[in-house]
């Protein structure tokens, strides 16, 4: 049965239409349901909002923003990037509504463009998701080291930060083994923690310090500490702060097989997570920048985390530690949500035979109805991606760029293929109507531009220590995908409908 016989179209589809049998829809798309559908519409929004996490992305890359354009680029860049990302989210939500599966982006690309489109989209998406885990949890480790430094004089060396990072990864792995219900509850708490945390930080930084920067400084001050002379180039690479933060909203799509009324809830979750984060992030960046007491001191702080130094200068030791604890908890929520999203991508990609050892990674725990092995693979690869941070001060920036240049093109591919399909694309219950094409083309154009930007060197002179390793990671994953295509192309493929003997046998084998 085609989707058009199941749905009435439009974002405001009636409740009885939204409450159709999602399990049957999943079977129509080719998969027997094996994951527990225990997440509601708020939980689905919450996972994308938690992964975007303005208290993680904005705070973690704030030091990067201080030298790549300074306050002007951070504030105006946030506004501009947020607008374009909203276009991407709207276009992606439309395709998600038509194809609500854990495979998400690669499944959409496969259905709309063919097996090779799906194959490369999946590998890019996987790189981005695993890079996101590394970036989020390593950022949490940096902030934890800063708190330990302020409270007990702990020296946050690269080695000690890596140990904290590994501990955080292990905690997130274990928490994801208990099933999607716990993940959903934690994400729901995370939404309110983030919103209350942003409000608390901004209010305290507004009320307590005696001195604040002027509005002219916050919105017009341009700072270039990159070594590059061209201000346009510096501004362009400075957009990484916002673009990195605005990533991961495909989590709503990856959790769609565990979401009630997913054809509507997952689409709305993507869009809502973006615009709520857009507002909250701007407030946070403005509040933090107004509170800067010593710009150079924040850049060169012994804590290793410029926001920590800003809070220390403005509030004193106790106030800074308390606010940093709010940030760290938010980052932990964020990393936990990202592990959930990445593990579902690993599970789905393995279910379709795309990964080495797919038979292991697609297995689902019968007790928790969770892809246990996929969880462990996700955190292990994320750990390996962060290892260069032991040897290079710029490696963390490369890890965040890996996230952006991996996952952002993967957003655009199904959008482009949907545009190419034209009227042959069968809409889901949530769609953009006549705005579909203009929104989609703006989204594709934006993604093409930022993909090029974040492959560029971020500092000068370009040396082994300062080069942008994201380019190497992107080349490596594309090479791996190409080589593995010739090995696994016969086993890889998304099913056209559920029910063949081979598919039933594979599903049965995957439940342990």
Image (cartoon, rainbow, N blue to C red):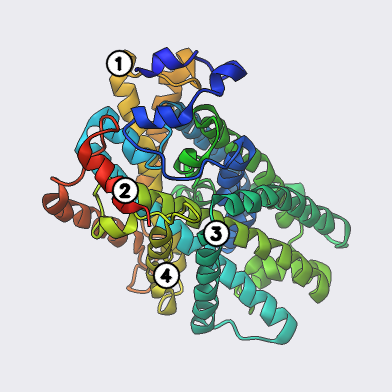
First in sequence, mark 2 or 3: give its number: 3
Q: Are the residues tagged 3 and 4 within 8 Å (C-beta)? A: no
First in sequence, mark 3 or 4: give its number: 3
Tag 4 residue: 383
The Cα atoms of the two marked residues, 2 and 3, are separated by 21 Å
Tag 3 residue: 178
Given this view, does label 2 or label 4 mark the residue nearer the observer? 2
The Cα atoms of the two marked residues, 2 and 1, are separated by 34 Å
Q: Are the residues tagged 2 and 1 within 8 Å (C-beta)? A: no
Residue occupying the point 46% across, 67% down: 396
First in sequence, mark 1 or 3: give its number: 3
Does dot 2 land on a helix, a strand or a loop?
helix
Q: Which mark is residue 39?
A: none
* Residue 497 placement (x, y as % from top left): 28, 30
* Residue 111 placement (x, y as % from top left): 28, 30
Given this view, does label 2 or label 1 mark the residue nearer the observer? 2
């Amino acid at each position: 049965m085609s989707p058009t016989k199941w749905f009435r179209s439009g974002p405001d589809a009636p409740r009885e239409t939204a409450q159709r049998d999602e399990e049957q829809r999943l079977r129509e798309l080719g998969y027997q349901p094996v994951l527990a559908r225990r997440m509601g519409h708020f939980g689905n929004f919450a996972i994308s909002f938690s992964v975007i996490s303005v208290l993680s992305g904005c705070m973690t890359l704030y030091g990067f923003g201080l030298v790549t354009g300074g306050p002007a680029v951070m504030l105006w860049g946030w506004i501009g990037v947020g607008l374009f990302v909203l276009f991407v989210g709207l276009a992606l939500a439309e395709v998600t509504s038509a194809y609500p599966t854990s495979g998400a982006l690669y499944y959409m690309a496969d259905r709309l463009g063919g097996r090779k489109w799906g194959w490369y989209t999946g590998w890019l998406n996987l790189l981005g998701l695993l890079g996101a885990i590394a970036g989020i949890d390593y950022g949490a480790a940096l902030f934890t080291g800063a708190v330990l430094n302020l409270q007990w004089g702990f020296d946050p060396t690269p080695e000690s930060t890596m140990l904290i990072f590994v501990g955080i990864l292990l905690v997130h792995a274990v928490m994801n083994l208990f099933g999607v219900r716990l993940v959903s509850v934690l994400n729901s708490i995370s939404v309110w923690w983030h919103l209350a945390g942003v409000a608390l930080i901004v209010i305290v930084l507004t009320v307590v310090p005696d001195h604040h920067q002027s509005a002219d400084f916050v919105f017009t001050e341009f700072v270039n500490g990159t070594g590059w002379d061209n201000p346009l180039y510096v501004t362009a690479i400075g957009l990484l702060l916002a673009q990195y933060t605005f990533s991961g909203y495909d989590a709503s799509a990856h959790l769609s097989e565990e979401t009630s009324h997913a054809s509507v809830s997952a689409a709305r979750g993507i869009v809502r997570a973006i615009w709520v984060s857009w507002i909250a992030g701007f407030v946070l960046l403005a509040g933090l920048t107004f509170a800067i007491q010593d710009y150079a001191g924040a850049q060169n702080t012994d804590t290793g985390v410029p926001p920590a130094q800003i809070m220390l200068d403005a509030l004193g030791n106790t106030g800074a530690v308390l606010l940093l604890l709010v940030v760290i908890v938010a980052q932990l929520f964020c990393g936990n949500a990202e592990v959930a999203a990445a593990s579902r991508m690993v599970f789905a990609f393995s279910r379709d035979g795309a990964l080495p050892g797919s038979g292991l990674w697609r297995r689902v725990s019968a007790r928790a109805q969770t892809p246990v092995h996929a969880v462990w693979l996700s955190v292990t690869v994320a750990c390996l991606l962060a290892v260069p941070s032991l040897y290079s001060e710029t490696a963390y920036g490369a890890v965040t760029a890996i996230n952006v240049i991996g996952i952002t093109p993967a957003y655009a591919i199904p959008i482009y293929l949907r545009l190419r399909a034209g009227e042959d694309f069968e809409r889901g219950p949530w769609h953009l109507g006549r705005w579909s094409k203009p929104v989609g083309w703006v989204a594709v154009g934006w993604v093409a531009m930022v993909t090029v930007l974040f492959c560029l060197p971020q500092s000068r002179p370009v040396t082994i220590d300062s080069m942008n390793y994201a380019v190497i990671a992107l080349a490596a994953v594309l090479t791996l995908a190409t080589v593995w295509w010739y090995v696994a192309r016969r086993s890889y493929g998304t099913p056209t409908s559920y029910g063949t003997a081979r598919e039933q046998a594979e599903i049965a084998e995957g439940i342990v």
